[in-house]
Amino acid sequence: MPGAPRATDGLDAARVSWSVDGRLVLDGVDCTAPPGAVSGLLGPNGSGKSTLLRVLAGVRVPDPAPGRDAAHVRFADADLLALPRRRRARVLALVEQDATTDLPLTVLDAVLLGRIPHRSLLAGDSAADRDVAAAALARVGMSAFAGREVATLSGGERQRVHLARALAQEPALLLLDEPTNHLDIAAQLDTMRVLRDLAGDGVTVLAALHDLNLAAQTCDHVVVIADGRVVAAGDVHDVLVPDVLDPVYGVRCEVLTHPRTGRPVLVFDSSD
Ligand SMILES: Nc1ncnc2c1ncn2[C@@H]1O[C@H](COP(=O)(O)OP(=O)(O)OP(=O)(O)O)[C@@H](O)[C@H]1O
């Protein structure tokens, strides 16, 4: 992405715990995402993926760790947990699952919200901001919708606008929670291609994904969590294997090889 700062190092989070109502949702998670690559955050429903993304994005504060080494979340030498909100928003963007926009905004105005961290507090949108927002809309194939009210969009269209808003932030680290939710198969592949292109531009991408085959075909690196703990992390060929996936998801999986890409193709059976 033009203007995006290039990260020299990727994301490095360590010992992240988060509890609610006395229940440990994340239990000492270590999670890395290599720079300029697409990483997948995988795990069953309720395993802690959204919570982890929210901690990494600074929306949730990790539990204190009295008497132990504290959690850290670093990106390209910056301590993300210590960065003020506005500076953090110039480094990273989070696309939340089923994000909603209640304000009566046009698509272009919703995408322009992504420019707020980059301008002075009282300034309006500049011509440059509008150019960045228009480029972000073009990148997700939504230019024709610029003047529409967000409330009138379909779920899939809205999902793409949220991605465009994040792109308008020009983040060096992009965190996404199930970015292919609501999307038909062609739109899913388009979104994953956008993520790959961003990685090619130097952006570090970490996306929570449910579709393990989409992850297998797209990701350079995957992290699997279950019950708030990391079970495995690494290259898709090493991690997307029955020894890891069967117990985590309670299924039986077989791994084939994609005839063109050489990447794993997973076929599932229920375990009983
Ligand atoms: N604010 C909260 N209050 C109570 N429980 C919470 C809260 N936030 C998360 N949880 C619980 O923490 C666990 C992990 O939730 P999280 O949304 O991170 O999982 P997930 O892996 O993203 O799930 P899914 O794939 O279903 O979206 C769940 O059991 C959830 O109910």
Image (cartoon, rainbow, N blue to C red):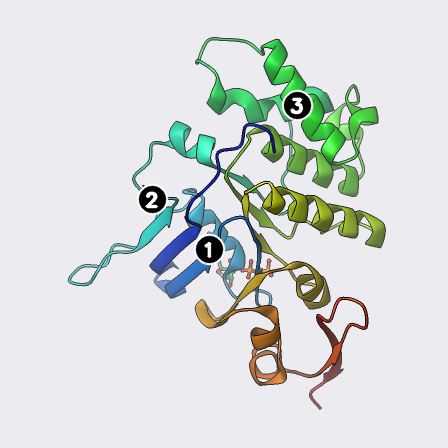
**Residue at 67% in and 44% down:** 197
Q: Earlier in the sequence, mark 3 or mark 1?
A: 1
Q: Nearer the viewer, mark 3 or mark 1?
A: 3
Badge 2 crowding class, 10 Å Cα cut-off, few under 14, some 14 to 19, many 20 or more, is few
Name which residue lies at 62% across and 45% down.
Answer: 200
The residue singled out by tag 1 in the image is: 52
Q: Nearer the viewer, residue 204 or 108?
A: 204
Residue under label 2, please give it.
77
Identity, as a three-letter code, of the amino acid under mark 1:
Leu
**Residue in view at x 62 percent, y 42 percent:** 198
Mark 1 is surrounded, within 10 Å at the Cα level, by few (under 14), some (14 to 19) or many (20 or more) other residues, namely many
Q: Position of residue 260 (x, y in %)?
A: 80, 68
Disc 3: CA contacts within 10 A as few (<14), some (14-19) or many (>=20):
many
Residue 206 placement (x, y as % from top left) = 55, 52
Mark pair 3, 2: CA separation: 28 Å
Q: Quadrant of the C terminus?
A: bottom right
Q: Which residue is mark 3?
A: 133
- Describe residue 119's horizontal placement relative to residue 84 as left or right: right
